[in-house]
Image: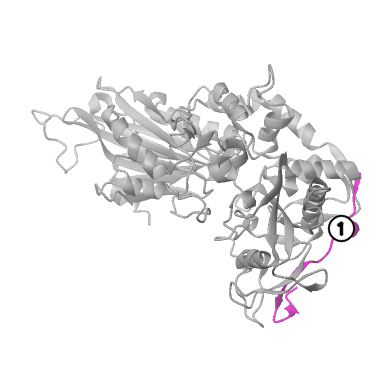
Amino acid sequence: MPLNRRTFLGTSAAAGAGVAIAGGSAVPATAHGHGHGHGHGRPPKRYSFTVMGTTDLHGNVFNWDYFTDKEFDDKAHNDVGLAKISTLVDQVRREKGRRNTLMIDAGDTIQGTQLSYYYAKIDPITAKRGPVHPMAQAMNAIGYDAAALGNHEFNYGIPVLRKFEEQCDFPLLGANALDAKTLRPAFAPYVIKRLRTPHGRDVKVAILGLTNPGVAIWDKANVSGKMVFPGLEEQAAKFVPRLRSMGADVVIVSAHSGSSGTSSYGDQIPYVENAAGLVAEQVPGIDAILVGHAHQEIPEYFVENKRTGKKVVLSEPLKWGQRLTLFDFDLVWEKGRWVVEKAGSQVLNSNTVAEDPKITGLLADEHKKVVAYVNQVIGTSTAAMATAEAAWKDEPIIDLINVVQAETVKAALAGGAYAALPVLSQASCFSRTAQIPAGDVTIKDAAGLYPFENTLEARLLTGAQLKDYLEFSARYYVQTPVGAPVDTAKLTNADSTPDYNYDAVSGLTYEIDIAKPNGSRIVNLSFGGKPIDPAAEFVLAVNNYRASGGGNFPHVAGAEQLWANSEEIRNTIIAWVQAKGSVDGAQFASVDWRLTREGTPVF
């Protein structure tokens, strides 16, 4: 658990880091011997500085939701975007003194909103005389010093990432993103920044960037044969001592990796997905870690290094620019070098400030273009459809994803060796707020149904494997005895199994008995009106995240790949709606699965 910040940090964190340090005596010498060696009882030289951090910005510049085409809002009234972060950054720089601050990010920058999609695919930054990516423009204007690579940086392929890198005035860091042939870092592993102190002795701050080894699985199509991604701990163990030997006084890791020590990879690769805590524990010489990837808020968390006993401070600001982390460092000059005496962290909430007009003004044209793009009408719908109850009911809106995927795979396999096999499809409720209205359907409606950049594959599975797959998926539900009340707010294990890791499979019929324990919930599994043959072969239309092992579902990652393409599923849905002209749920909606308890439907 995080220690109490007050007890560990004493009182100096609030003592105006880097501003009131005339003569280096802002903070009195503490009682643990740091006064030694300074001669004649003079107070030791001290310096304080602050490192600000964001992570998982996912293409958010404005406090705007392009999928609903209105200002972003959620239950907690969080705000999003770099325009808000910019205002917070300015406040911190005014308070601390700009030269006593650094600004870093922990990755997942160029994917996630229709704004970032537009400049990767519709008006791509890679085109001759193409535009400058809005995220590069905003981050340059804010004055970032470094950003780690996130796994979603690779979604659009390496050329888009390289172009983005070229457009940034700061390095993109990835000490464990290696060239597949030379095994040398394909991006800058680290950067060393110098902070000038009033004492004539600079502080050298090293920032080491680490990305997620899962890139090798999730973006296999883009990186296979080009880059490899070893574990965070092994690369940190290689670089941290090197940075210390180069004279780094402070070492900060920016890690696109959660802190929990868990993985969704299963046994596909031998590395840990959420390794930030392990890095702190195993690699001596790190002062702080900016954590990313897990989309969790960790204001301050201390991990003790097993070899030195030293406490390393970790912080993860909430995604999309909802929070800004501040790491405060208090240093003392001791035996001819700067030593970190105290380090702590906190997060600031971006909903406490207004958007910075410098950022919103800079990107007003790009924003307008994307709003016009998402509001293009692509067809009509005979009835309204929504995902509000799709987490526990087979809803037509999820059937729409499945029918598009199954038809696309059938057409791709037509005339080939597998053309005669039945095609099933998996889909998840990615967002509980997605809807297709009755009447005009726009790009934003269709895209909101599928907010991820996933592509489509076809994998070969048996009836027995499909049953295992569905049993695994059904862990999503909390075991609820017969007769016990069912509260939909508590029905799913959303903490351990997010909505996107629950799959509904269409083309089969089955029941999920939520009164039964995990592993024995799938009942009456049938195909074509008969119990499924465990040996029968089926084609599963599946997204690349799931096919490459995301969520660690059984069998699918090892199953034979019959077909794959690089077109995003959401674009396939948009094109399908455009081609049909109208969406009529009556033509494709069917109830293939339901929740039951001892044969009685729950709903």
**Left or right of 326 in this view: 375:** right
Nearest to the observer: residue 57 or residue 63: 57
Work out which residue is located at the far front of the displayed protein and give it: 417
Picture coordinates of residue 97, whole percent (x, y): 39, 26
Nearest to the observer: residue 368 or residue 207: 207
403 is higher (above) or lower (below) than 54: below
Q: Which residue is mark 1?
A: 588
Residue at the image position 25 percent from the left and 48 percent from the top: 307
Nearest to the observer: residue 6 or residue 537: 537
Q: Quadrant of residue 568?
A: top right
Q: Is residue 68 visible?
A: no
129 is higher (above) or lower (below) than 476: above
Picture coordinates of residue 322, whole percent (x, y): 56, 43
Residue at the image position 57 percent from the left and 57 percent from the top: 552
Magenta stretch encompasses residue 101:
no
Residue at the image position 55 percent from the left and 35 percent from the top: 225
**Amino acid type for the residue under numbered disc 1:** Phe
Picture coordinates of residue 171, whole percent (x, y): 48, 26
Q: Is residue 460 visible?
A: yes
Q: Which residues are magenta?
A: 581-603
Magenta stretch encompasses residue 594:
yes
